[in-house]
Image (tube, rainbow, N blue to C red):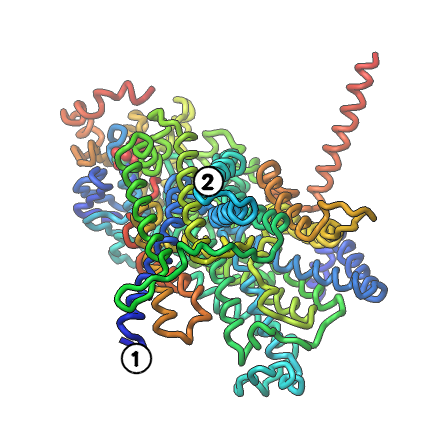
Amino acid sequence: MSLLRTENVIMQFGGVVAVNDLNIDIKKGELAALIGPNGAGKTTAFNVITGVYTPTSGKVLFTPTDKNGATTEIDITGKKPDKITGMGVARTFQNIRLFKELTVLENVLVATHLNADYSFLSAMLRAPKARKGERQAKMDCEFLLERLGLIDLKNEKASSLPYGQQRHLEIARALATKPQLLLLDEPAAGMNPQETDELTDLIFKLKTDFDLTIFMIEHHMDLVMEISDHIYVLDFGCTIAKGTPDEVQNNPKVIEAYLGVDADVED
Amino acid sequence: MVVGMTMETFLQQLINGLSVGSLYALIAIGYTMVYGILRLINFAHGDIFMMAAYFTYFGIAVFFLPWYVTFIITIGLTMLLGVTIERVAYRPLRDAPKTSLLISAIGVSFLLENVATYLFSGKPQAFPEFPLMTTPFFIGGLSFQPVSIVIPIVAFILMSALLFIINKTKIGMAMRAVAVDYDTAKLMGIKINGVISSTFAIGSALAAVGAILWCMKYPSVLPLMGVVPGLKCFIAAVIGGIGNVKGAVLGGLILGFSEVLMVAFFPALTGYRDAIAFVILIIILLFLPNGLLGKKQVEKV
Amino acid sequence: MKETQNSIGAYLKLHWKTAVFLVVLLIGIGLADIFVDSYMRRLLNLCAIYVIVSLAMNLVNGFTGQFSLGQAGFMAIGAYTVAVFTVPIESRAAIFYLEPMAPFLANIQLPFIVALILGGLASVVVAFFIGSPCLRLRGDYLAIATLGFSEIIRIVFTNTQSITNGALGIKSIPTISSLWWTYGTALLIIIATVLLINSTYGRAFKSIREDEIAAEAMGVGLFKTKMTSFLIGAFFTGIGGGLFAALLGTVDPKQFYFTLTYNFLLIIVLGGMGSISGTIIASFVVTLGQEALRFLDEPMAFGLDLPIFRPGLRMVVFSFLLMVIVLFYRKGLMGTNELTWDFIAQKYRSIKKKLSGKKTSTEGGGN
Ligand SMILES: Nc1ncnc2c1ncn2[C@@H]1O[C@H](COP(=O)(O)OP(=O)(O)OP(=O)(O)O)[C@@H](O)[C@H]1O
Ligand SMILES: [Mg+2]
């Protein structure tokens, strides 16, 4: 079953066509990757999916599963980002966007706001419902921090974390929104090979444990080829190839556009 | 046409609206240029205008300088004031959070108002009349104050000059580049500080001319005289599309005409004259948040 | 029953210092209420009102990062509501002598507390109309729109003669002089704000201040959350204005000139944008400081006729102070920190360390 589909999505900024006729189809439970050279339009594609930008034309369709297990396809094109997140799409940012002045724990707690079921009045009165909600949220978030190896840093300011751990925190924060689809924008950027390996394992485990579908932008080819079920390749906004890692790896267009400069990119 | 208004008075009101609108336009340009480049509401701009009015007052009514000397000194001092404010109060905060910059602008505004009150007293000071400008003359039974004609003409000449500077000169090109993309312009080797200083100098010079003309039309000065015109002219800039010089002119004119005509058609609302700008602001923000000539801005994520 | 007792016990054990502090504070207010003279009483009342309004401003500007400058206007709404609804009916004819009070209001008199809350709610309604267009757009517009609103509301109140008595203002408002009204309200508002800030709503506010795009991506609805903060702020500010009217016993449009707002701006900048305790401290510092520096406005300040001391100098000093803080001490007294027991202990330790560090280094130098 498709979880996320885009139909002929075009995103234009003035004269720049950042994404040109994007058609993706991500099945529930798979791990798909989006690759392509710098400036190919990958982040823009994520921004369109998550509602940061409204596409110039085309449609984004998402099929979440509700608590009864029922599924309906919803047109989320141009919906507000918070609404889309509320339906079950979470993301991380390529250029880390943590809440710098807040603590690690607070960063994750923010992402539980959409599931909070008490009003600001009961928060101001510390009503039992608010107290219970707070306690539950805190427990959930500490569990996530535990999973991402950040629990000992929970009271540190987010901006004081080393780069790699900031990326982990971004993932923890995204998970706290209870997503069905997780979009990761270059989660391994700036990491050394060992860290990248660890991250690969982690992503894989999180995917199974949280029953996630993952769509990931990544430049580290080993990582991508190792864990992806499907790969989409963008170049100048156009989809030049899609398929399994094997198919993509052997596609001459891809080799020309991307893998040919792979060595440069990985540096 | 509303009963009680003849064609003649209507024409007079139109000329009046044109001159008020031109004054607003001159001040609004300063707001829009600074906002275009620094994304800052220069709260002090209205008070720079007020200081210019005091410079004029001192030149003419206290030191009895010839008017042309006074005008030159006023424009020079006001430019210096504008550039100094940017240098001292805004430049050090360029990399600070935006709120700090905004607070600094409010602080400068507050400081100028208080310094003016302290130095010049809070009471209004009257100008000697400019008979040349205020003695009415008649055309076909209509009486006009010369100043109401002079203001739009001066304003028109200055705005044409400004558009020429912005579109045809090197510094103008640099200004546009910085306004479009601050970081890229910096990377391309444009001297940001110079561009920003010129922006403040030009904006302040126009405010100075606005103040001089203002004093001819309304011959009195007051430490808080810049507040309401300042707010209105920022609104004029928003109406036209903030960051857009032609928009500021358009917004200023629209505001001038609306005020004058509202009071002319509905004399009962005279007390609310200063409120109309804010009503227009709310309407514009609701239906045309980018103003009449402004472009939609997308933040890069 | 036993369980609640236990939980209260546990709570006290955890927060005994705070509990002791609160008790001492309440006793202090009680004693002050009995012993201070009327001048000091008025000043202390003013401090509490400034705490309320500044806290509300910090909620919006410091915690949520939305730049509102409408404090004077919202206070005016609260103040006029209290004035209109609490002035004794029999004295209304004498007050509204230019134009009688509008018939639909003339015979309505409400208890102070009801009028006070009504004033807060009226502010909320107005705030909703300002916020609806502005909070959807780039932040800067809110600053101009709220400042503009402050001016309009004065214009409106000056022109609605039969409701507000126009430029003459309304006198003979029944006054409150007990410190309990202002300090009681301030205390309630402080507690409510602390609890709010430490809840999911407070974190949502702060996330918007930190990064709107990330906040939205984490499911925080920008408009709704900003509006929540803005409306709560307007409510508290309206309440502050109502207390202000009842403290002074008179309202007129000039009291609510927009420069009033700059006092609160100075307070939150001095205290730290995003610090509740900083705001409280700064409210006292600024209010008492403005009183203490009154001599600056008096020509004969030091018994000499110094020409620099004359009306207006005090405000010059204050606006200069605002500039100095913004330019050189951007974080104010507290930054985004709070004066918690941990914070005090930590500061105490670091100061002690610094002092002993200095000692050893001078000793080292002596050797
Ligand atoms: N808000 C915007 N306004 C104008 N142009 C934009 C905007 N966002 C993206 N672009 C342009 O769209 C193109 C694609 O950018 P995008 O960030 O999507 O690339 P990318 O594939 O993510 O690259 P990278 O690997 O460097 O992250 C670029 O040319 C970029 O400059
Ligand atoms: Mg990218």
Q: CA distance from mark 2 to mark 1?
A: 47 Å
Q: How far across and how far down the image is residue B160, in percent?
A: 28, 43
Nearest the eye: C215 or B77: B77
In the image, residue A191 sits, relative to residue A126, either above or below, namely above
Q: Secondary structure at mark 1?
A: loop
Q: Which residue is mark 1?
A: B3
Q: Residue at x 28, y 64 (%)?
A: B139
Mark 2 or mark 1: name the one nearer the start of the chain: 1
Q: Quadrant of the C terminus of chain A?
A: top left
Q: Is residue B206 above or below residue B134?
A: above
Q: Nearer the viewer, residue A67 or A176?
A: A176
Q: Residue at x 28, y 70 (%)?
A: B8
**Can residue A123 be seen by looking at this rendering?**
yes
Vertical placement of residue B154 versus C96, above or below: above
Q: The numbered mark 2 sits on a residue in which chain?
A: B
Residue designated by label 2:
B69
Give the x, y percent position of residue C15. 72, 52
Question: In the rendered structure, which amino acid carries the disc numbered 1?
Answer: Val
Which residue is rendered at x = 43% and y = 38% of the image? B200
Q: Amino acid at mark 2?
A: Val
Q: Where does the image place residue C5, in percent across and percent down from the top left?
A: 72, 62
Q: Which quadrant of the view contains residue C333?
A: top right
